[in-house]
Image: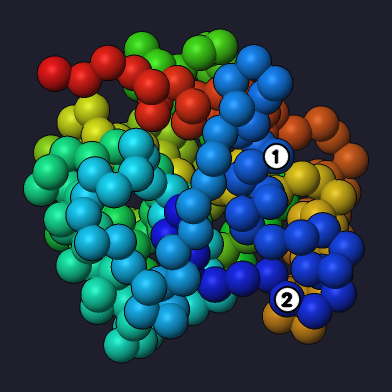
Amino acid sequence: MLLNDEIDGLLYEAHGGYQKFFYDLLNTDTDPVTITVYDVVNNELPKDPFEQEGWIVGGSRSSITAVEPWMLKLFDFLQDLDDHKAPTVGVCFGHQALAHALGGEVQRKHSWGLGSKPTQIHLKEPWMTPQMNAPVITFCHEDEVVGLPDKSKLIGSAENCAIAMFTKEDHIFSMQPHPEFSNVFARDLYNDWKQSFDPSALEIANDSLNSPSDRQIIGSWIKEFFSYPRA
């Protein structure tokens, strides 16, 4: 996992960090996973695109629209992963970083994208098992991808997020929502950051978390994507 930020304070004490989130999402007794973390913000980057079997590009409070020095090395490595067709999954900031690094476009939104909402799937890939037409997943973002990289395909769209998921050939699967966030964590996160949100939007977002999430479906897709045979 390319770690581009970390949960902190009371949120970390109550819920843990990104490594735990993705481990809980992907690990099963019959198909265990190991997640190795590279602290990208502190310039800890892999030396080889095939150092791991696959890559998760994680979230961040930083913004692609205000590039920080550490991001430049991240963009270079993402281009390297793309050049070598190494299996790569982007999530939220990671989704935006992949789009930016590979020639797409990212812009600041007019308002935060919050809440648990359906992502309408436009194009089904063979590794999307079990299939689902509109999985409900949690969003929390202030930037969004507005232009796809070359050779990419739009996979899913959500309310107020036209490019919620995209793929590039058979080696990149990228998404704006956070399948690693449980509804319990999302509610605590929203309330911890409530000063950043419009109160009515926060109320709607919290209400949406009363319904079940389909994040385990996305977790299954990620695992199938990593293990799917490639030429």
- Amino acid at the residue labelled 1: Asp
The percent position of residue 160, horizontal first and vertical second, equals 53, 51
Q: Residue at x 80, y 79 (%)?
A: 9
Q: Please name the residue that numbered disc 2 is placed on.
A: 8
Decide: is 137 above or below 5: above
| Label 2 Cα crowd, 10 Å radius (few <14 / some 14-19 / many 20+) | few
| Label 1 Cα crowd, 10 Å radius (few <14 / some 14-19 / many 20+) | some
Q: Residue at x 30, y 88 (%)?
A: 69
The percent position of residue 19, horizontal first and vertical second, equals 61, 54
Is residue 212 at all visible to an observer of this figure? yes
Q: Are marks 2 and 1 in contact (CB under 8 Å)?
A: no
**Does residue 34 appear left or right of residue 184 in this picture?**
left
- Amino acid at the residue labelled 2: Asp
Taking depth in this image into account, of 163 and 95 the one nearest to the observer is 95
Q: Residue at x 67, y 24 (%)?
A: 28
**Does residue 112 appear left or right of residue 147 in this picture?**
right
Q: How is the image coloured?
A: rainbow
The percent position of residue 1, horizontal first and vertical second, equals 46, 54
Q: Please name the residue that numbered disc 1 is placed on.
A: 24
Taking depth in this image into account, of 44 and 202 the one nearest to the observer is 44
The percent position of residue 180, horizontal first and vertical second, equals 64, 45
Rendered-image quadrant of the C terminus: top left
Q: How many marks?
A: 2
**Does residue 130 appear left or right of residue 7 in this picture?**
left
Quarter of the image for residue 97 reads bottom left
Decide: is 140 above or below 160: below
Decide: is 186 above or below 217: below
Is residue 105 at all visible to an observer of this figure? no
> Of helix, strand and loop, which one carries label 2?
loop
